Image (cartoon, rainbow, N blue to C red):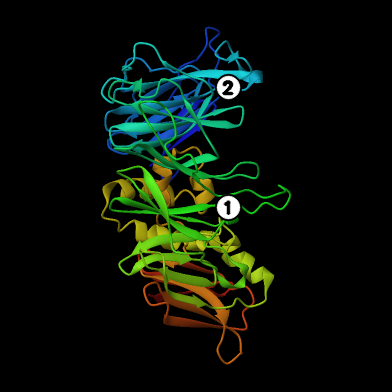
Amino acid sequence: MIVVHTLMGLRALDVRTGAVRWSAALPTTTRWAQSPRHVRLYPSLNKADRIYASFDDRLMAYHLADGQALWANPPRVEGRIRDIVQHPAGIVMLPEAPPASEATGNRRVVNGIVQTALNVASYEDGATIAAKPLRMHGNVIDAMVAGDTVVLAVDAESRTFVNVLEVATASLRLKKDVKIKGQLAYAELTPAGLLYVSRPDAATNAEVNVIDLATGEPRFKGAIESGKPLSAEDYNAGRYYLHHAVEGQTLYVFANRDHRLYAVDREAGTFRALGGEIKLQGGEDPIDMEIRPAGVVLIAPQNLVLVARDGHVKQQVYYPAPQLPGLVRALYAVNAVRAGLYGAAASAYGDAFAQTSRNATDPNARYVTTSLATAYSQAGSQLAGYSRQSAALATKRFKASLTVPGSVFMLTRAPAGNGNVLLEIDKDSGQPRARVDLGSEREPVYAVDDVAGMLFLRTAPSTLVGYRL
């Protein structure tokens, strides 16, 4: 079954026949009985009997079997709901201000900054934990679960601020929101405070820092930063990204600006540089980083570097790419980290991955993927309207990957100089594990299912060949 929103309300459709199983009208949202303008659906992550729907400033839970509302009254925020976080202690409703053209008395602006207010709802009856919604100076654009709390990212006129929400009490830890550089990418609460990593944009550095929750002040006066370009016209976000990975008490960070590896002590709230500059060949920068038993692995389209935990380089390999710009674009199109499903082959790959998904043992993944796989062939369409948490479950098997747990795939010229080969490079040794000869294929279409351990290669317009990894 799949649930959709139409102008007439919610409809539950049989995925095989398209028949309507049930219908549910959404409540009107104004005194003039106006239909809601902003509706989003959220699959439940921990209660299999329901689905959540937000309509403008309200949220409701609906029974999947018959479409009946599960709460007597919908909880509300100030603004409109842009997303929800399904935390064990309650449902955090994240608000944003409606556009001025759609405002119906639920939009406030103070000193040029839109004002919103969030709240936390009970799973059982939808009752809000806070008697009054918590005021936020801007739109809540992101939220990350951190133990008993949720770290909030608030946008105020293109500036990002953070705060920490105690979900059980619907209260904020910091007296004032704290401004950070860039957009929030990673956050956790440590004994030293709020440790975060941000993402850069064309005008703003990314940074790593720790916020003291008692004072609201950053602990690092000279934070680890990404740098930014002199001009935004030819901006390449990958060159300014702060790659990071956690192991034990240490957060490892690689900064592309100075090509150095840093270690952040999560307990003490301190950091230090490890070793010297690490340069990749071919003018590349890392697009991914992970922790392996042998050390820290930096991954680029044609480079793999294994760095010891003290910062010295243990192994570095480079496999030059064929000089075919179209080929490189096809392989590294999506975020330069995970390859997207390519062109017309997306439907075929989606069907193949959906079949694998139906064998999933995780109940959450199985619930989300079986509901969506038969309705959509492309991951992008599949995710429209779903919360970030649900999307993470729904896409695990639907995205092709350039990496699998123990290896990375690199396209290079064949050793004999005839044609191209796809090499599977071991992350620990840097040596090829396996190869697939592509012949003279200029733009091969392939995808890796890192769950099933298969590589799929399109060898003809209607032919898909699978290789077990």
Q: Is residue 94 visible?
A: yes
| Disc sitting over residue 98 in the figure | 2
Give the position of the N terminus as an image quadrant: top left
Query: Measured from the top left, where is residue 291 in percent x and y?
Result: 36, 61
Count of numbered tags = 2
* Identity, as a three-letter code, of the amino acid under mark 2: Pro
Q: Residue at x 59, y 78 (%)?
A: 320
* Identity, as a three-letter code, of the amino acid under mark 1: Tyr
Instruction: Tell which residue pokes out farthest to the bottom in this image.
Output: 416
Q: Is residue 441 above or below residue 168?
A: below
Query: Measured from the top left, where is residue 419 in percent x and y?
Result: 61, 85
Real-space Cα separation, disc 2 to disc 1, in angstroms = 32 Å
Q: Is residue 314 above or below residue 51?
A: below
Location of mark 1 (residue): 240
Q: Is residue 20 visible?
A: no
Query: Measured from the top left, where is residue 179 in percent x and y?
Result: 51, 30
Give the position of the C terminus as an image quadrant: bottom left
Binning the other alpha carbons within 10 Å of mark 1 as few (below 14), some (14 to 19) or many (20 upward) gives many
Taking depth in this image into account, of 104 and 156 the one nearest to the observer is 156
